[in-house]
Amino acid sequence: QKEVEQDPGPLSVPEGAIVSLNCTYSNSAFQYFMWYRQYSRKGPELLMYTYSSGNKEDGRFTAQVDKSSKYISLFIRDSQPSDSATYLCAAPRLGKLIFGQGTTLQVKP
Amino acid sequence: GAGVSQSPRYKVAKRGQDVALRCDPISGHVSLFWYQQALGQGPEFLTYFQNEAQLDKSGLPSDRFFAERPEGSVSTLKIQRTQQEDSAVYLCASSLVRLRGDEQYFGPGTRLTVT
């Protein structure tokens, strides 16, 4: 079993929709989590990180962690075609990042 | 300020050839990481340097993979006797400190195709 699991999608939504991206993890020692966005043929770029449980909001993006169920979510409000990318959840362990498989999102105009 | 740069961006190698992939981290960044990203997968950790010291190479898949960072800045990942299963994107990331994973900045990657 991978330490961080993610549905690869693809996920296709119309412009303006609310998008929900999810990951599960198995290692209880993970203390915080990150979401990276990766455009085609580019390196991942950090979108958001969250500590422990709870929500964190940044513009149209909200990250949520539920430690009791080992569940991580990223919500995108008012999705735009420019949000079309692969979204990777990750957790650091001893400094190195453990990534999920990534979910490919397409936002159609 | 420039970000992390990698060269070449694309590399085609015949099976059995040796390849060398270069990473130029952000100036002043102490930590440097290499990851391997197979098609349709998330990046997987290969190795980590703090300055010139290779502190973790637990992710290197075989002894054909070798990484160095002799002066604590530029790093090279070398793959000897390439195999088809080595085909992937190799990502380099750097960070100012190691303590927090959220400070890793990624380069664009080198896409290696072994034919």
Image (spheres, rainbow, N blue to C red):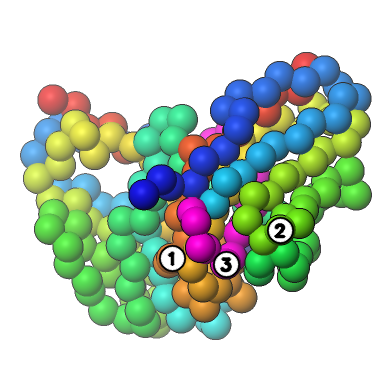
**Whether residue B89 is visible:** yes
Seen in the picture, residue B34 relative to B53 is either above or below; the reply is: above
Span highlighted in magenta in the image? B26-40
Task: Give the CA distance from mark 1 to mark 2.
Answer: 22 Å
Q: Please give left or right for residue A66 compared with residue A4 in the image.
A: left
Find residue B30 and name its label.
Answer: 3
Please give the chain letter of the residue carrying mark 2. Answer: B
Separation (CA) of disc 1 from disc 3: 11 Å
Numbered disc in front, either 3 or 2: 2
Q: Mark on residue B71?
A: 2
Amino acid type shown at disc 2: Glu
Residue that mark 1 sits on: B103
User: Residue B51 lies in magenta, yes or no?
Assistant: no
Pick the residue in front: B51 or A7.
B51
Local packing at callout 2 (Cα closer than 10 Å; few below 14, some 14-19, many 20+) is few
Front residue of A38/B18: it is B18
Residue B92: x, y in percent?
58, 48
